[in-house]
Amino acid sequence: MTATLERGLHALKEVIDAPIASYFSSCVHCGLCAEACLFYTETGDPRYTPIHKLEPLRRVYEQEYTLLGRLKKGLGLSKPVTDAELDAWQDLVYDSCTMCGRCSLVCPVGNDIVYMVRKLREGMAASGHVPDGIRNATRRTVEIGGPMGLKWPAVANVIRKVEEATGLKVPVDQAGADYLVLLSSMEIVNYPEYIEALAKIFHKAGISFTVASDAFEATNAGIQIGNSDLAKVIVSRIVDAAERLKVKRVLSPECGHAYMAIRWEGPNLIGRPYAFEVVHVLELLDELRGKGMLKMKSKIKDPLILHDPCQIVRRGGVLQAPEPLIQEVAERYIPIADKQKWNWCCGGGGGASAIHTEEAEALRAKAFQVKKRQIESTGVNTMVTFCANCRIVIEEGFDHYQMDTRLLGLTELLAEHLEE
Amino acid sequence: MDALELLTWARGPGLNIALGIFVLGVVWRLIEIYSLGRRTDLAPARQHAGASGLHTVLRRSVPPPGMLRSSPVSYIGGFVFHIGLALIVFLFAPHILLIRDLTGLSWPALPSQFIDMVTVVTLVAMVVVLVDRINKPAKRFLSTFGDWFTWAVTFLPVLTGWMAVQHLLLPYTLMLALHILSVELLLVVLPFTKLIHAFTLFGSRWYAGRINAHKGVPV
């Protein structure tokens, strides 16, 4: 389908609902959302004020759904949304918004700003104003199966290596398993230790699991770009596999946007509830911890802080699991001031990390200063997180600022210290 | 038309027209907004203490952690002038008399010297938030004609009311007529400007609370 301005405006009209109408009507231009956005706090550029990023959507709302706006439009007094404007807005909607949702927590009139950014992206995608990086990731996911273009033989290869390293079987396409394990390409390519960790933990807990050869990828670039039709195609692969294999639960990997896609957006994309339950890996681990099935043989001694990925914690609702889990394995866990739902984004969520223009990369590096400050103010050399995308972005930040901080994945850390 | 005739018009037909536009305008806007509805969330809900629409309606009245320090003028100035306006509008004896004439409802008033003081504090707070709007980059950047205009139409009734009570600048009758006319202007523009937030903020907070509570996040 060719992207056109007409399709874009139509998409924007379609997404406007009562919450959005209420939000735009309530905004008093107080600008407090800017203080919650790392792209504003780290640059001081008022263009990055979250509510401003929604201006094209606001105008479509005003011109199509309010009496005065329709009157003004009829008299030719309103400024129509144009291709040039949407093009100029692209960096505000993608490069400088990771859909972290921190702005939505502070708005005094209660506007859920990130809810609207997600909807605005539908119009941006339909009108063709999306960054090439995210466009290509989406195309690869639809055509090949994953954002990095990874095919099953490569995954099978990684799984074989995991089996060799752990001496444990990783079942593939096994019907009737308790869990269908989903992965993100970034984990498969950059952090295969995550798969080893899972195999160990499942084996130890005596839980059956399987990987599906036609639905291993959990991430959903369709959601990041803002194309619900493609997002539906991508999420349907998982739903089909899970229902065919008759698993009880689908295990979302650490990856934040994958969790958002499969747990919260999925049923709404396919238009019905699932026949299975979706669980984030940390929820499962915390459940095992509660049952006394996650005993550690030792603890990590270094003082460390936790980075709570936005889509899992603030926007995903996995609020309670991370802290008890880190305390299980760390001797000196230091809670930071802005933790849990108040945590600051790594700067590369929502597809932003797939944008590789010079400007976008420079902006990401600037935004990373907020994480740098968190690390420096606590004086630690170790940070733990639980999202493959956060890990990539944070490691890029460490490289950029030549920091010698160590970054660890929570699931692997737990598996490493698991009682034999 | 002399001052007395102006006052008579403002108190009679003027007030009726303004109240009519205000009531119909607010009802129209609320229907226009909330009749759009929203789709049911099909993902299974998660429960969490403190996460609901009502929680968010209440919670957003206090500054979130760290925000008071980063934007003290917005919060303190905002609190002062909103509370000030409410006290002046609903607890000044002449206003209660007007409300009684219109609706039959009545309640005790605050002493007028106290309302005087509240009025001065409210005027000062409104000037302070205006200066803050000019000074703070994000606020200034977002500001449109509507922001300056709504500030003025909110400020004028307070100023003219205070000046009428204090017998400043103009004869009492004329100042009172201007006061009532300025209130009428406020009533007429409220439904069609950002001032409608006086009504929609409850809906907005409720939606945000509800939508996020579905995911188990108290926002």
Image: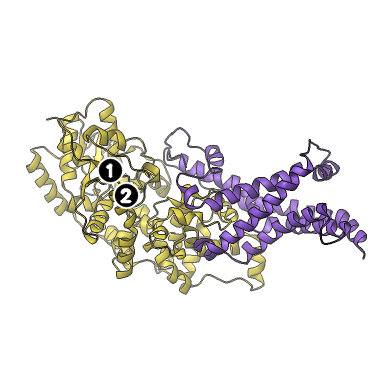
Q: Which residue is under mark 1?
A: A305
Quote the CA–CA distance across marks 1 and 2: 9 Å
Residue A374 circle label = 2
Q: Which chain is home to disc 2?
A: A
Q: Which chain is purple?
A: B
Above or below, B131 against A281 in this view is below
| Three-letter amino acid code of the residue under disc 1 | Ile
Query: Which of the two labelled residues, at mark 1 and mark 2, occupies the earlier sequence position?
Result: 1
| Three-letter amino acid code of the residue under disc 2 | Gln
Residue A146 can be seen, yes or no: no
Tag 1–tag 2 contact (CB < 8 Å): yes
Left or right: where A293 falls relative to A109: left
Residue at screen point 24% across, 32% down: A328
In percent of width and height, residue A225 lies at 37, 60
How many marks the image carries: the answer is 2
For the view shown, which residue lies furthest in the top direction? A292
* Residue A135 in which image quadrant: bottom left
Mark 1: give few (<14), some (14-19) or many (20+) Cα within 10 Å.
many
Residue at screen point 38% across, 45% down: A338
Q: Which chain is home to disc 1?
A: A
Residue sitting nearer the eye, A267 or A315? A315
In percent of width and height, residue A265 lies at 40, 47
Q: Which chain is yellow?
A: A
